[in-house]
Amino acid sequence: MMRPMHTKLILCLGNPGSTYQATRHNVGWLFGDFLAKTLSASELTDKKKFQALVRTVKRGEQQIIIAYPTTFMNDSGLAAAAIAQFYQLEASVDILVIHDDLDLELGRYKLTHKLPRTHNGLASVSEHLGTRDFACLRLGIDDRHGSRVIPALKYVLMPIPETARQLLETQVFPRASQEVIRWL
């Protein structure tokens, strides 16, 4: 008799569309692409019932779903809830949300169950799952060096400078992906 596969969800937060593709707010999606390559995940599939683009990976008796909600950030919880319900996931052990974090400096990351002070995407996920008890990989995006001239809402939607993107792709993402693999 075959044992059923255990499913884990890695939900990568961001905004759909080319306008937002290279912004700080889409660091979750960028990390998802990096992780997908690292894990040799499948190609993206549009799963309308989940309101998400999805990649899958099978590792032993584990199925990993890397999902990118196709809603805007503030409605990311719709995808989280649809996937969690379909696969009967337990949020506290089966769900990891990857997101940008303006409370952390660029180059830093933190895998935690503690949500940041404000993040509308996480608020949506928490609301739709009915819990705040899920893992988060917080990817630091703040490289303002103490200057708060640009309001946060505008700052997160600005393009990531090339030097910051290189730092993320060559240093942060490789280390953070090892944390995610340990979490799996």
Image (tube, rainbow, N blue to C red):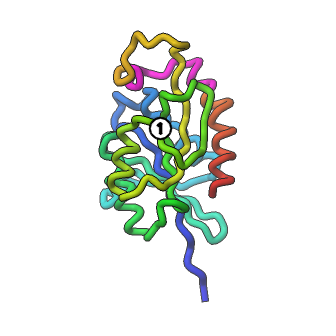
At horizontal 44% and vertical 54% (from top left) the residue drawn is: 54
Percent of width and height locating residue 53: 40, 51
Q: Residue at x 46, y 27 (%)?
A: 24
- How many numbered marks, from 0 up? 1
- Residue 92's spot in the image, x, y percent? 51, 60
Could you tell me which secondary element the residue under label 1 belongs to? loop
Task: Work out whether residue 121 can be spotted.
Answer: yes
x, y percentage for residue 181?
66, 52
Query: Viewer-proximal residue, 63 or 151?
Result: 151
Residue situated in front as seen by the camera: 46 or 89: 89
Residue at (41% x, 63% y) in the render: 84
Q: Can you say which quadrant of the picture contains the C terminus?
A: bottom right
Residue 43, visible in the rendered structure: no
Q: Residue at x 55, y 35 (%)?
A: 139
Disc 1 residue type (three-letter): Pro
Category of crowding for the residue at label 1, using alpha-carbon neighbours closer than 10 angstroms: few (below 14), some (14–19), many (at least 20): some
Asked if residue 59 is positioned above or below residue 162 in the image, the reply reads below
The stretch drawn in magenta includes residue 163: yes
Of residues 121 and 29, the one nearer the viewer is 121
Q: Is residue 70 left or right of residue 2?
A: left
**Badge 1 is on which residue?**
116
Rendered view: 124 above or below 86: above
Q: Quadrant of the N terminus?
A: bottom right
| Residue 86 against residue 15 in the figure, above or below | below
Q: Is residue 129 left or right of residue 11?
A: left
Q: At which x and y percent is residue 154?
A: 35, 20
* Magenta highlight range: 155-167
When asked about the image quadrant of residue 163, the answer is top right
User: Where 84 falls versus 176 (above or below)?
Assistant: below
